[in-house]
Image: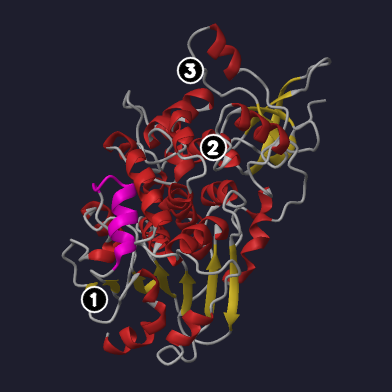
Amino acid sequence: MIKNEYQWCSWCYRKATHRLVKRNYLTRNEYICSSCGNFAVQCRYCQNMATFKPSTKKAKGFINSRKENWASELCAEHDGTIADFEKLNNRLNDLADYESIFKRTKWNLAKTGKIAVGAVAGCSIICPATYLAAPGIASALGAAGFLGAASTGTAISTLSGAALTSASLAALGPGGVAGGIAVVSAVGAALGAAQGAVVSNSYFGAIKDFKIIKVKDGVGPSLIFINGFLSQKNQDSSDWVSAVSEKYTTNPYYYVTWESGSLYKMGNLMGKGVGGTAFKKYITKLMKQGSRSFVKKLNPLSLASTISEIIGNPWHISMVKAQMTGVLLADLIARTNNIDGFVLMGHSLGARVIYYLLEALSTKNISPINDVYLLGGAVDRKDIDGWEKALKAVNGNLINCYSSNDNTLKFLYQGANALVSRPIGLGDIEVIDNKLINKDTTSIIAGHMKYKEIFDKILREI
């Protein structure tokens, strides 16, 4: 009697009938998924299906062929790729309920091994789990049809197995998945659905101190506050709340925390003064690292050699984590039921988070973002293509507040990026769009950390 299995598939992340095609006595039985057509075997620790070989063999050479036909030991839940198959398409009634998407029902049995392998490879400095999960993320996006065609002209979504993974990673570019740079344009349409959750599962936990805290209930569009550099280790939203309470009296407020350690190191350094010896020494170090070749490969997960250049460097770590945080937030916002939409407010690197959030949401037909406020933003203002995409995700206005008195961005941001990137915190975003408002606040902003102190005054003027 042939026994078929109705279980979750680690190829396509769908629950489907798996038809028994080969009964083995010394190894696990082989099945074929009715949804994606790939071969699977049962996970060593549960009834879900682990990946086996693709429906069509593409690999060339003995070694690659053996890899393509190697059965995985664990399903996507047990190998840590995702937290729970059943939650991949979950909706949220409140953004603060985000943790339910990532609550594990089974042990991540591969976690220890992945971190160990990442450490040996020199890739665990920033984000071992995300780096090693990159092939899985890429394959999920490729199979869903979000990455177009391979170099051969074949649609990536028609491939499977090693060919699917290889073509998907190639389409994203070196390190695209891990750093959140190239992936944002591909992941947008998947946000709020299963493939978006695969990306979110990989980023969540890799971003230290990531939390979404509901500050208060209310009615109307929900405000989301995102900080950059911090002046104290223990984060709170009191400065934001004080600044916006006059204009947004009845709205719900949310506060996003992320990478507190690195952000505090930078804020503490600036607190000693941009003219101080420690600050000048740090900038000199960054400028030496900020060669044009380094900037071209700014995603520090692309090569182990690049990673070795930024060990202990909280600035570049924070820049990469801002990109990842933006993509993660975009998926969570996209799966939240909120008919009134959101208003985003970001300072410094928090504006960078918002930039990547907007880019990711720009590929969706409908965006829930109303207005956006960027204060002293640490993100390139000359990236025309990027800002045009980002503005597509904004239904109201995007207000960019900048000040020529911001010495932190003058020396830190531009120095660390070899003077090839000009931040929006020092001038106009160079895009023509009716939704964009560039506001020069030089007359009232004396420095980088002064924005939130008088943000209420900026709101009144706007």
Whole-number angstrom distance, CA of label 1 to CA of label 2 = 41 Å
Report the amino acid beneath label 1.
Thr
- In this orientation, which residue lies closer to the viewer: 58 or 407? 407
Q: Main secondary structure of the magenta part?
A: helix
Q: Is residue 352 left or right of residue 207?
A: left
Res 228 → quadrant: bottom left
Q: Dot 2: what SS?
A: helix
x, y percent for residue 141: 47, 41
Residue under circle 2?
131
Report the amino acid beneath label 3.
Lys
On whether residue 232 falls in the magenta region, the answer is: no
Q: Residues within 10 Å of mark 2 (few under 14, many from 20)?
A: many
Whole-number angstrom distance, CA of label 2 to CA of label 3 = 24 Å
Q: Dot 1: what SS?
A: loop
Q: Is residue 386 above or below residue 235?
A: above
Residue under circle 3?
58
Q: Is residue 153 above or below residue 197?
A: above
Q: Is residue 77 left or right of residue 462?
A: right
Instruction: Name which of mark 1 and mark 2 comes first in the sequence.
Output: 2
Residue under circle 1?
442
